[in-house]
Amino acid sequence: MPYLTDETIISMVARYHIQSGNPTIDRTLNTLFDTKQITLNHWIPRHLDRLAEFMPGQTDLLLEGFLQNNTLFPLLNLFLGQKGESAYLMQQSLPKRAFAGAGAVRVCLACVNDDELTHGTPYVHLSHQIPGVYTCTKHQVWLIDRCPNCRQPLSRDGSLPLGLWRECICGYSLSTFDPKIVRSRQKIELSYASFCADLLGSSASPIPADVLREMYRSRAVEMTGGRKSLLDRLVFQGMIHEFYGSVFLAKLNKDFSLGDFDKSYHWQSLSTVKEVPLIRHLALAHFLFQSIRDFKEVRAAAEVRCAEQRGKEGELQQPLDKSTKLFEEMLAVARGIPKCTLEKLWEQHYGLTKRFIKRFPDRLNELLRAASRKPPAVAKPAQMRPLLAQEDQEWADQFRKAASTLYQHADERPERVSRNRIMIEAGWKRPYPTAELSPKTWKALEESLESDWHYHARRYVWAVLVFRPEQGVSRITKASGLDNLRIKELRLFFSEVTHWPLLKPGVIVEFLENFGITRQWIGPCPDKQFPQLGRRYQRKLRESGQAAK
């Protein structure tokens, strides 16, 4: 199987399938990956170690080459990754969503002909599969993801794009069509594609979180003319919309769930900058820097500033030297002796006093004066005063009312009714209530919470009422935000429902109560174990030699 850089894994497998003459795609997948259950159009496909073992050569080097040259790992690792020993280990430290990202297979008709002349075969270019790239910067034409004649997708749900090497079912081949040239008013898409391709080929190391945040923050403040290093958010949002245009932003949102990324400022927080989806990193970086040269220059300057800041913080956090520790220890001992004198120190702490006088023979008077003064008072953390009986009852009623309001919402996908949400809704601005200081308020808060399965059931019922059962399982699953395993259990639990009510405030809770589902519902399968979701998910690390086992 010939090896080409800038070729996607799905293209490599498709070429091998054509050249091998295998009668079915399942046989090809079983030969290369020892499984047919694999989706190859993901940004980082699974089981690449098995593909590396199939090909001649050293497995570790081939696996490293696949990740660096035939997947979007360099882009994902640049923004989301951490420094590691090898590409394989760094790949496993990436967030789980980095492996699930996928899109339609896109090709350039001009590149198809050029590749045929240059390499003897066309292939799917990796740089054309970057999220948000719809143009070929080399030929300045639009990419296609389906047959120009019959509109059949080149790849559906991760299937092999065999239309590059065979005629389509309509009888036409891609080489018979002329590409569509990008117009002058659409040059922004060419600029975006060029910037992303340069990032992909830059072989840059992962950007630390503090450096990435500093790069974004400093350039955004500079562009908006913010004062005192503060970002003018309204100006920033307007500049983004003017730069990209509503058409391109809508296309990114439809294909890659871009969302209102100009209003989501997670990139300004050190704890969340690595949680921003790849498409938002790319769109934001292109808007702020627009060229790979500017990107590298700003990164170098940000690394210097962050290194200086780390040095200052390190100095503040450096442990006290031995001399300072000895003086502080001696002072604490002297303050513990009423009317401390040297004689009392020698009697009660002979060894420590000997070491102190040997090290500080001229600071004895300073020690005794400091010991005679009262130590500075340490401020105690503020504590909530006990609530009066009437106040306690009023806040308990307010918490129950706030929780009821949250459960009644039906305009958008339900959010978990948590302690913080209830307290915010009720207007509570004190520390957390406790059973000792506010027993009724604390009890009302605890009784207003919901179990995991009650929360999942509310989401599932909401999605069904919005899209109705006839819209299909996949749309309901996506709208609910739940995983397939939990959706399967909930569908089975509600399988006997023949009439679903219309969505209105309060109908979801009423519907659940009719099934005996309370806020503390333990679920349809309480003994069944499910994988942890979200940030609690822990991806297992393993060496590349053990990956095929």
Image (tube, rainbow, N blue to C red):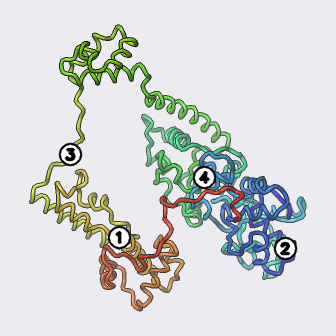
Between disc 2 and disc 3, the foreground one is 3
Residue 237, x across and y down, in percent: 48, 51
Based on the displayed image, in which of its 4 quarters is residue 159 positioned? bottom right
Classify the position of the N terminus by image quarter. Answer: bottom right
Q: Which residue is mark 2?
A: 18
Instruction: Assess disc 4: are there few (<14), some (14-19) or many (≥20) residues with their C-alpha within 10 Å of its C-alpha.
Output: many
CA gap, disc 2 to disc 4?
34 Å
Q: Which residue is mark 3?
A: 383
The amino acid beneath tag 1 is Ser
Q: Which residue is mark 1?
A: 451
Assess whether mark 3 and mark 2 are in contact (beta carbons under 8 angstroms): no
Assess whether mark 2 and mark 1 are in contact (beta carbons under 8 angstroms): no
- Residue 371 vs residue 161, the one in the foreground: 371
Q: Indicate whether 487 appears above or below 286.
A: below
Q: Which residue is mark 4?
A: 282
- Residue 28 vs residue 169, the one in the foreground: 28
The amino acid beneath tag 4 is Leu
